[in-house]
Amino acid sequence: MVTADLPGRNEPCHCGSGRKFKRCCALGTTADRSAAENASFDFGLAAENSGKPELAAHHYRRVLAINPENVQALINLGNMLSDLRQHAEALETLAKAQRLAPHIDGLHLNLAVAYQAAGRLPEAIAYCRRAVAAMPRSKEARATLTTMLKEAGNLDNYVQALAESVEAFPDSADFHAQYGGALVAVGRPADAVQFHRRAVALEPDKLVRRSALIGAMMYLPDLDDRELQAELNAFEQAAAARAQDEGAIAVPALSPSGRGDRLRIGYVSADLREHSVAYFIEPVLEAHDRTRVEIFAYSNSAEEDYVTARIKSHCEHWRACSELSEQELERLIRADGIDILIDLSGHTAGHRLGVFARRPAPIQLSWLGFPCRTGLRGIAGYIGDALVTPTGEDAAVKLEPTFNCYRPSQYASEVATAPVLKNHYITFGSFNNLAKLSEPAVGLWSRVLIEVPASRLLLKSRGLEGEITAAWVKSRFEGHGVDPERLQFLPRDESLDEHFRQYSLVDIGLDPFPYCGVTTTCEALWMGVPVVSLVGHRFAARTGLTLLSAIGHPEWAASSEDGYVEQVKALCASPDELALVRASLRSRMADSPLMDARGLTRNLETALIALAAGENSPPVERWTAG
């Protein structure tokens, strides 16, 4: 964007024309300013730099009263008016500046940002594209365009803009990481991995780059355990080195006995709001026994909503920490005297694993937010159960019978009649993100469609809003012999009400693999939709098994592809029986361990108290990489 920092008269003009300032933007604007004009402009600039847009606008208006064609004053006034949400006047002012100085390419970007602020995104994108065309080497212009395209929702356009940005700036870690994230969103995690690796190579000390790589790798159906472990180890080394460089201090001692035997538990998360994690942590926070434990919540998100308000009411201590550095948050946690610190994010966005590497609490665990170990030596391990924990792997805490409990959204509608009774054909469905739609899953689901005549498959995902991605997904099924006409795609809904109503279109849910659903599976079951899952060897491939077992339907979790198909066909055999399952599933789920928040929370508290007392194995001093 064009800013208020003006060059000297004989210096190159800031607009990039190659001409001297006095023979370019200064013409007709600042060359013959009166002393009053100069003073008012300087006062405006000072107010702008002090974060006082209203005062700045006042002084820029005084400049323009003296010289209505002062382009820089018009630009600055337009920017201030946009900040003040006086959008119509802001756009008119910037448009006038562009008419007076059409050679200033940066004005396209000013107008783009002003249109975006005014809520007119199509015009904003159009101006931003002009800015990129006029200034192809402007990183700011490209970054602004990608942000706007992401906001617009068509991920195909977003992906294409990032591909061009990566080509234009091959050494930009930001663009490589964003491109990797966009590729995951449109279902191309294998392609995403290579761009995340490049981002890591460019910024090896930045933990968020390594986490994004690990997150993308989790979707790969052919991921080698040794390759994953290597990246987890690399993350640990980077986090430990940074903690050591910044002077992390010794692990504090456990001391619950000095506080009336109440154990202090701290939960760290960026998702204590309308988010999948909240469906599982809120009921636990509400059910905690305050005679046994004292609860601290460390929220790493500036975004708060109605769910945040409820969660706050369940916590004795609320710590907003999104603006705190790792050292500051570490000091806060130590000052709070936390006995057991629990990470709820893993390697997902907004995590604070760098703080966990500094060991601010004597016992540290991970839970709910990420279906894998974190890699940090400072985290003892995860909270799991006997079914979800992979063979040969030990969870730090094993709850029984399940590792989590679910609270449905308040926006979930009543269970609808089974659509097969009206359609006279079975509709399968998956509302999972496209990255989970692995090639093995496409192959198996194609087999299901072929073996269940006249059936349909409904896929719902944000990534399917783009024509390119939708056509690509159809071609993948077509390659397995499925007529594209049997596929129906839905975009992400604007409201949760509408999201839950879409389950009325689905008879049977198909769980993707090897990265199974969790929230989507619980949502489908609550809406009366039975879900069939394929059990794998990793934690992420076993969540379907534990969820379905918890509601009394372990038979819906198959151990082989043949078993998966047979279980689907068994559910399809009688539409009337399927309708009965649908009608009874919500009440069955409500009475199951999956929704027994009190029972799970008591088990959790007992396990954590025993862990703090040294009664659980492995003991604290022997903990290894979590």
Image (cartoon, rainbow, N blue to C red):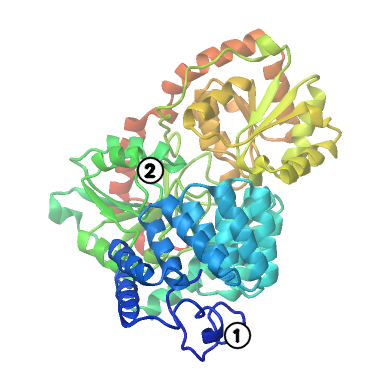
Residue plotted at (37% across, 45% down): 272
Q: Position of residue 561 (x, y in %)?
A: 74, 34
Badge 2: how crowded within 10 Å, few (<14), some, or many (20+)? many
Kind of residue indicated by mark 1: Arg
At numbered mark 2, what does the secondary structure look like: helix, strand or loop?
loop
Which residue occupies 46% across, 48% down?
A: 369
Amino acid bearing label 2: Arg
Residue at 59% from the left image edge and 75% from the top image edge? 202
Cα–Cα gap, marks 2 and 1: 52 Å
Quarter occupied by residue 52:
bottom left
* For residue 427, side relative to residue 111 (left or right): right
Residue 210 at least partly seen:
no
Residue 117 horizontal side relative to residue 252, left or right: right
Viewer-nearest residue: 426 or 609 = 426
Up/down of 264 relative to 621, above or below:
above
Query: How far from the left and from the top, in percent, is residue 343?
Result: 39, 54
Mark 2 vs 1: CB contact within 8 A: no
List x then y, in percent, for residue 41.
35, 75
**Which comes before the other along the chain, label 2 or label 1?**
1
Q: Is residue 454 left or right of residue 343?
A: right
Q: Quadrant of residue 286?
A: top left
Residue pointed to by mark 2 = 273
Q: Can you tell which mark lies on residue 369?
A: none
Identify the residue under disc 1.
19
Element assignment for label 1? loop
Q: Nearer the viewer, mark 2 or mark 1?
A: 1
- Please state which of residues 422 and 288 is positioned toward the viewer in this rendering: 422
Question: How many residues crowd around disc 1 within 10 Å: few (fewer than 14), some, or many (20 or more)?
Answer: some
Q: Position of residue 413 (x, y in %)?
A: 47, 21
